[in-house]
């Protein structure tokens, strides 16, 4: 979708007042390496025979970090059978409350909707992490979300990397002694690994 394209909003209205309808569909976040985000798309439709004025909207962050306010001037004036569509980016998953304030003649009306923001990508990642008895959360110095799975042979004595599911660890002061199979698949920080065929390698991972 082009940056300035008008998004299509489908589905039944989540709030109405007379012939005025507010639509805000539930959304699923899309994720990159750094963050997840999606647009909350608000559509106000005036199906009546007289103009209405959309004054402002308040969108509460699903992550609970506050609210965003949108205000309109004459651009919020909706004539008969007209509509106003706006997008607000959200990054948090959960429940978002959206309130739109408009004026219909002498009446000031508040339309409120509850929007569910889900994250199918992260839900699947958490489920996979649970299946491997791992720990899901920020990983490494960059804090990227991911899973650190537990191995099946953690703690088993070993003499080489290939003897273990995720490598053979040894303390630097005990080189030449048996190591232990790593207990997890991710190893941030500095560790000494036992190589196949003898010797060790010191490796640091951020």
Image (tube, rainbow, N blue to C red):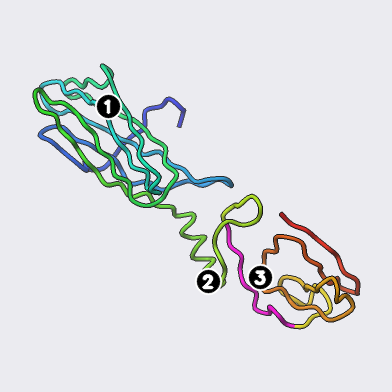
* Secondary structure under the numbered disc 1 in the rendered image: strand
Write down the residue under mark 1: 84
Whole-percent x, y for residue 59 in the image: 32, 39
Report the disc number at residue 131. Answer: 2
Report the residue that reaches farthest toward the top.
74
Report the residue that reaches farthest toward the bottom.
157
Q: Main secondary structure of the magenta part?
A: loop
In terms of sequence position, does the residue under pointer 1 or pointer 3 come before the other?
A: 1
Q: Is the C-beta separation of discs 1 and 3 under 8 Å?
A: no
Which residue is rendered at x = 53% and y = 71% of the image?
131
Which residue is rendered at x = 42% and y = 37% of the image?
89
Label 1: how many Cα within 10 Å (few below 14, some 14–19, many 20+): some
User: What residue range appears in magenta?
Assistant: 146-156
* Secondary structure under the numbered disc 3 in the rendered image: loop
Q: Is the C-beta separation of discs 1 and 2 under 8 Å?
A: no
Seen in the picture, residue 11 relative to 168 is either above or below; the reply is: above
In terms of sequence position, does the residue under pointer 3 or pointer 2 come before the other?
A: 2
Seen in the picture, residue 30 relative to 20 is either above or below; the reply is: below
């Amino acid at each position: 979708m082009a940056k300035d394209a008008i998004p299509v909003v489908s589905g039944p209205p989540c709030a109405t007042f007379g012939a005025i309808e507010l639509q805000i569909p539930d959304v699923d976040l899309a994720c990159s390496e750094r963050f997840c985000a999606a647009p909350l798309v608000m559509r106000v439709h005036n199906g009546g025979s007289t103009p209405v004025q959309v004054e402002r909207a308040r969108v509460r962050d699903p992550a609970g970090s506050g609210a965003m306010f949108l205000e309109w001037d004459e651009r919020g004036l909706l004539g008969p059978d007209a509509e106003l569509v706006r997008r607000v980016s959200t990054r948090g998953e959960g429940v978002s409350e959206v309130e739109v304030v408009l004026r219909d003649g002498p009446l000031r009306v508040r339309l409120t909707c509850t929007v569910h923001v889900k994250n199918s990508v992260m839900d699947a990642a958490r489920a996979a992490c649970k299946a491997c008895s791992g720990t899901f959360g920020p990983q490494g110095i960059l804090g990227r979300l991911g899973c650190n799975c537990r191995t099946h042979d953690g703690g088993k004595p070993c003499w080489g990397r290939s003897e273990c599911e995720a490598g053979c660890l040894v303390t630097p002061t005990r080189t030449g002694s048996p190591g232990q199979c790593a207990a997890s698949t991710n190893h941030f920080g500095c560790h000494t690994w036992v190589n196949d065929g003898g010797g060790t390698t010191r490796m640091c991972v951020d």
